[in-house]
Amino acid sequence: MQSFHYTFHKQLDKLFERFLNLGALVEDRVMKACETIKTRDPKLIKFVSSSDYEIDELEIDIEEECLKILALYQPVARDLRIIITIIKVISELERIGDYAVSIARRVGDLSRADIPMRYKPDYDEMISAVLMMLKLSLDAITNQDNDLAHRIFILDDDVDKQRTKHYEKVIEEIQKQPEAARYLVDCYILARHLERIADRATNIAEEVIYLIEGEIVRGEFA
């Protein structure tokens, strides 16, 4: 029996390590995607746009490992919550990776715009908040820290407000420069993608609370 528990926890530790590697990979891709917004570096745009397969493959591998552990060891209580949380969070991380790709591709489209735009959106504040939320969500689950998870909900409100400001500004600019409407909409969609990353980070924070407290709080902090 002791050997059984030892083997199980050994497998669980390896699983959690791979899970953290996925989190680090996703965070790196989001940071690079945000960098493309600032620099429009074509090499970086190409890299982020075509590198999501790594995230997809790692997500599938981790999910399969979770299912194997569930079948072999039939964990209960906190051990079961850890595995359930990992399965849910890797799905969130995979979607965040998709948004990073979408941001890079959208920046690529804007870089090829054939109409000069007078509007120069500033995403710096929004990017800072989103990157902080993603970092906090990963730190919260790594350290199983409730306080970090709750900080994310406050930041999410701020990101939502910033997205609304970008929307209102783009509508205003379309009226001034209707011939650039397509590209102005792309400017708003960038803000929308950033907001969706923030939403996914919030979902991760909710899963951290579930892991620690055993209570589902989904949507309670919206």
Image: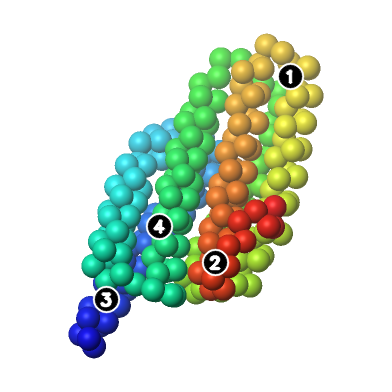
- Position of residue 102 relative to residue 9, above or below, is above
- Position of residue 61 relative to residue 113, above or below, is below
Residue pictured at 73% horizontal, 19% vertical = 174
**Could you say which is closer to the camera, residue 41 or residue 185?**
185
Q: Position of residue 35 (x, y in %)?
A: 52, 44
Residue pictured at 53% horizontal, 58% vertical = 204
Q: Position of residue 192 (x, y in %)?
A: 62, 37
- Position of residue 145 relative to residue 189, above or below, is below
Left or right, 24 with reference to 214: left
Looking at the rendered structure, which numbered label has been put on residue 87? 4
- For the residues labelled 1 and 3, the Cα–Cα distance comes to 59 Å
> Which quadrant of the view contains residue 145?
bottom right
- For the residues labelled 4 and 1, the Cα–Cα distance comes to 42 Å
Left or right, 212 with reference to 47: right
Residue type indicated by callout 3: Phe
Looking at the rendered structure, which numbered label has been put on residue 210? 2
The answer to whether the residue labelled 3 contacts the one labelled 2, judged by CB atoms less than 8 Å apart, is no
Element on which disc 3 rests = helix
**Between discs 4 and 2, the one toward the N terminus:** 4
Report which residue position mark 3 lands on: 8
Residue type indicated by callout 1: Ile
**Between discs 3 and 4, the one toward the N terminus:** 3
Element on which disc 2 rests = helix
Q: Is residue 216 visible?
A: yes
Instruction: Nearest to the eye among marks 1 and 3: give it.
Output: 3
- For the residues labelled 3 and 2, the Cα–Cα distance comes to 22 Å
